[in-house]
Amino acid sequence: MSDIKIQNLTKRYGDMLALNDVSLTIESGEFLILLGPSGCGKTTLLRCIAGLETPDEGEIIIGDKVVFSSEKNIFIPPGDRNLGMVFQSYALWPHMTVRDNMKFGLDVIKMPVQQADKRLAKVLTDLGMSELRDRYPSELSGGQQQRVALGRLLAAEPAVFLMDEPLSNLDARLRMDMRVELKKFQASTGSTTVYVTHDQTEAMTMATRVVVMKHGNIQQVSPPTQLYKNPQNTFVADFIGMPRINLLSAKRPKRAGSVFTNGDIELDIGWCPDQNEIIIGARPEDLAICKATKHKSSNFTVSSVLPNGPEVIVQLIGGSTSLLARVNHDVNLQQGELMEISFDKKALNIYDAETGQLINRPES
């Protein structure tokens, strides 16, 4: 078992609270991604798991071993936690060949030569690096260097893989290729993997679950699809998705019902929350638009048309309200055209205007 239990973890740097009473269980064999903006605490949490940072309070259990406990005064050094880590910089020895870099961890634990050679041969083959085994890091591309860093990790066969933004130094196309490789790599090993990134595309395409963080607090822990469709608060809703979600602050007029307005548009959300002031969340693909056949006060004007391969992103303006819609690439729109808009009621997320928290829709 290589599950990880984090209980009430707190970490301070002077007056700054980097982790605020964080609790999280990472299941054995899952690919969990820590996601959030710079300074949210994701790297601090990873480094606490690795033993590179010492928390002020809380407990960390890896498998059946307590590796940190403030209450029991336990701190297991990084080298004794059976972890492997890939850094953003890859941290390769420049004077060592590909093979020797991968073999470094095995030399540290003094693995018998024949066993080490057999394991290295398999890793080099699995990563497609056999023909490059005698090259030095300076002779490799960014993607190849990353494979060496992964190979060093794989050769050591740790129970847990920790990865701190390992793709951030690569160009966009290679980053995409390496996402595929990383996902295959993790699936083939079945190792518990904790991965830090600020790139939501990496998180949404690779993770089994995503942990969204802000100011040292966990905002939501969900599989990618659920995170996109049902963000639990307005921060997660706004942070996840490209183009970004439409968030409309709206009030219920002086009558009961499911209709709300922000002054520029009236919207029937299809059910009646208790709150009179809400925030309506609508993904761009949940807006339907068509050319207006007659003038209405709620019509919107096309402000910008942004072709993007198989889709077109359309910005619409109505009064002081700006909306984004996602339409098919063959839709022909011109700036200044008047449009009628409608929303997919079932896809809307409704948030409390005061707390920003998701209001649960009544079961039908």
Image (tube, rainbow, N blue to C red):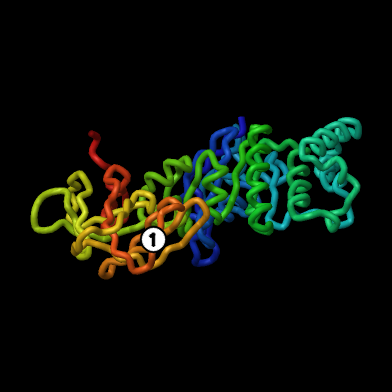
Residue 339 falls in image quadrant: bottom left
Residue that badge 1 annotates: 333
The one of 355 and 202 positioned closer to us in this rendering = 202
Residue 334 falls in image quadrant: bottom left
Q: Position of residue 160 (x, y in %)?
A: 65, 39
Q: Position of residue 128 (x, y in %)?
A: 79, 40
Compared with residue 191, is residue 259 higher up or lower down, i.e. above or below?
A: below
The one of 104 and 363 positioned closer to us in this rendering = 363
186 with respect to 115 (left or right):
left
Rendered residue at 61%/37% (across/down): 192
Q: Is residue 72 visible?
A: no
Mark 1 residue element: loop
Compared with residue 125, is residue 19 higher up or lower down, i.e. above or below?
A: below
Q: Position of residue 134 (x, y in %)?
A: 91, 47
138 with respect to 216 (left or right):
right
Compared with residue 234, is residue 209 higher up or lower down, i.e. above or below?
A: above
Q: Residues within 10 Å of mark 1 (few under 14, many from 20)?
A: some
Residue type at tag 1? Leu
The one of 72 and 31 positioned closer to us in this rendering = 31
Q: Is residue 31 visible?
A: yes
Rendered residue at 42%/46% (across/down): 228
Quarter of the picture containing the N terminus is: top right
278 with respect to 120 (left or right):
left
Q: Position of residue 211 (x, y in %)?
A: 49, 47
Rendered residue at 54%/51% (across/down): 201
